[in-house]
Amino acid sequence: MNLPTLLATMPKAELHIHIEGSLEPELIFQLAQRNGVALPYASVEELRRAYAFTNLQSFLDIYYAGASVLLREQDFHDMAWAYLQKAAADHVIRTEIFFDPQTHTARGVSMETVIRGLSRACKDAKKLGVDAELILCFLRHLSEEDAFATLEQALPFREHFIGVGLDSSELGHPPEKFARVFAKCRAEGLHLVAHAGEEGPPAYVWSALDVLKVERIDHGVQSAKDPALMKRLADERIPLTVCPLSNLKLCVFPDLQQHNLRELLEAGLCATVNSDDPAYFGGYMNDNFLQTAAAIGLDRQHAYQLARNSFEGSFAEPSAKARYIERLDAAFAAA
Ligand SMILES: [Zn+2]
């Protein structure tokens, strides 16, 4: 079996996907029509053209505009369902989906509407052969008080999400800004992750680990600038949820050939491949795997390690992880 076919068909987990970032222009227009929301774009094509952003902030501006069409429980379900079908087609068998409740509650949509819609889609995903869980993310450009209020609203629905994360504009909003709310989440038994070292410095990765006590780093590619940090990440096998096409689109690397995924893997880090905001960044999981493998010259062993890391880095129960890895080994033995 050739490498592209193996990459596409091997079982894998996705650990870094913002569900609002999976909204395709077609679905945005469909939901706008269903809900009577006026969009500042005349057509699907015009909206797609507006996706030519150059940095994280210009992306976030259009991302929040797109989310404005989500009003009812069914809208959240349909958004997640569209993503889950694509994930299943890419042989994703486990996904841990980020959602940004503050983007919705700030518009008057209730926490219950958001969580019930997403959660129902995750349960339905079993029919597609996908184990799907939710991770609630706090928007870091907002205050810690706002994050506390969000957590309070979400706790009545605690059984519907497995962890919390930290996303949105990284620069100027270091992890330590959220130290107290993460401590509270830890006390609630929630898993902890945070975006760090995407545009921000290695210092943000250190403080995500030491102050927030996260179990995984989202992105983390700037860690390569700090040898002591690289050693720690390797020694402790702390997963990094790397998103190559997102890094390319947001100019974290000038081109995909210069992406450091291979360097991270070869330094023994638990690096994984993920799609981040696939509707906006030009690709879902297999697009990320195939384009990155071609650009940086991944081989069969790298492919296996990336898929294995995705399962080991997931928050699945040990028995489920063992099952996933058995399926991965079977796929490689047959290929
Ligand atoms: Zn992200």
Image (tube, grey):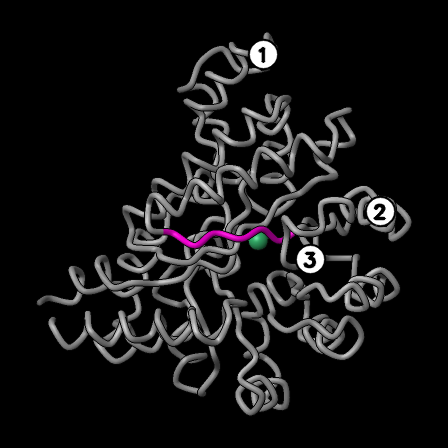
Which comes sooner in the sequence, label 2 or label 3?
A: 2
Secondary structure at numbered mark 1: helix
**Number of numbered labels in the structure image:** 3
Work out whether 173 lies above or below 278: below
Q: Which residues are magenta?
A: 130-135
Residue designated by label 3: 164
- How would you rate the neighbour count of disc 3 (Cα within 10 Å): few for under 14, some for 14-19, many for 20 or more? many
Secondary structure at numbered mark 3: strand
Picture coordinates of residue 258, whole percent (x, y): 39, 68
Picture coordinates of residue 51, whole percent (x, y): 48, 33
Residue designated by label 2: 152
Looking at the image, residue 160 sits to the left or right of residue 323; the answer is: right
- How would you rate the neighbour count of disc 2 (Cα within 10 Å): few for under 14, some for 14-19, many for 20 or more? few
Q: Is mark 2 within 8 Å of ligand 1?
A: no
Work out whether 32 lies above or below 172: above
Which comes sooner in the sequence, label 1 or label 2?
A: 1
Per the rendering, the mark at residue 35 is 1
Which of discs 1 and 2 lies nearer the camera? The answer is: 2
- How would you rate the neighbour count of disc 1 (Cα within 10 Å): few for under 14, some for 14-19, many for 20 or more? some
